[in-house]
Image (cartoon, rainbow, N blue to C red):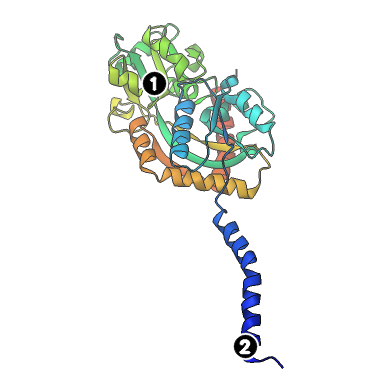
Amino acid sequence: MNTPNQMTRRRALTTLAALPLALSVGCSMLSSEPDLSGLRMLIPNTPGGGYDVTARTASRILENRDLTGSIEKFNVVGGGGSVALARLMRESGNENLIAMVGVGVVGAAQVDNSPWKLSDATALARLVDEPEALVVGEASPLGSATSLAEAWRANPRAFTVGAGSAVGGPDHVFAVELARTIGIDPNTLDIVTFDGAGDLLTAIIDGSVDVGIAGAGEYIDQVDAGSLRILAVSNPTEDAPTLRDSGIDLEFTNWRGFIAPPDISAVTRNDIVDVLRTMRESDEWHDALARHRWADSFLPGEEFSEFLAAEDLRMRRTLEDLHISR
């Protein structure tokens, strides 16, 4: 029969024996934060374009707030984004790779008859919406969307439009829809496409194109410096007239977000979505939204996946309706 002292001693020994297991479990719980130390970020156009600016802004905030480790950024240029999409899709299961995408990649994949659609990737989160902008150099004789429409209608074959995206990208599709809205036959257009707003910038400044079309936030520094002027934007912003202000009945929105290769684990997907959600709530991100004229349009995980499927269908119908092909 055990005495009370023997029972107390046995309980103490049992408790001591259980301590290593308890400590192990506790340490495991403390270290359950996602390990996103090896992320690489694929950007589907040239430095200085909308994808590039959005991706690098997000990356800087993620790193500065210690939500991830250092992120390797790299640009993959070609096909308006279809080359980048192919690169991503061929890395199925790679949990250290994410890519910035938007309307342009949806259109480029379809124009290039890619074997993949954007909705075949792993949807992480849509981040922002951005209006399109009609941009001219400081010396341009065009002073408004109204004067642009008049000059364009007068001689559409001689009026050169520079689009900061490939055929099927948002800037190109917007140019075609704008022409059609103001009564110009899309078959008469002289549209020169560029693989990103960075490449288009020189053509606007030196007058190689009569007007450039890019995201409203892509030339902030040049507009502030006075080397470029925004004639109008496709959706309301705080400091630029809209097309509808000039009597042109058209609205158009671009969006951007992150995807990952197919077949990554649900745990990794959720971890990345969570850090993007945390980034989106930061003061730094709110400041970036205001500076770049971006509208918050956060859409995570499965909701973004459903959106991408709808975008694939919408873009296919749009391209068929506009008779756009590369």
From the top left corner, tell me how far across and down residue 299 is, in percent: 49, 45
Residue position marked by numbered label 2 in the rendering: 5
222 relative to 177 in the view: left or right: left
| In the foreground, 247 or 288 | 288
For the point 67% across and 26% down, which residue is it? Answer: 114
From the top left corner, tell me how far across and down residue 131 is, in percent: 40, 30
Circle 2: element type: helix
Q: Examine the image and state in which quarter residue 239 appears.
A: top left
Q: Examine the image and state in which quarter residue 178 appears.
A: top left
Instruction: Report crowding for label 1: few under 14, some 14 to 19, many 20 or more residues within 10 A (C-alpha).
Output: some
* Image quarter of the N terminus: bottom right
Q: Earlier in the sequence, mark 2 or mark 1?
A: 2
For the point 40% across and 8% down, which residue is it? Answer: 155
| In the foreground, 25 or 214 | 25
Q: Vertically, is 35 above or below 170?
A: below
| In the foreground, 149 or 200 | 200
For the point 49% across and 43% down, which residue is it? Answer: 67
Which disc number belongs to residue 262? Answer: none
Amino acid at dot 2: Asn
Residue position marked by numbered label 1 in the rendering: 182
Mark 2 or 1, closer to the camera: 2
Instruction: Report crowding for label 2: few under 14, some 14 to 19, many 20 or more residues within 10 A (C-alpha).
Output: few
Amino acid at dot 1: Ile
From the top left corner, tell me how far across and down residue 104 is, in percent: 53, 27
Circle 1: element type: loop
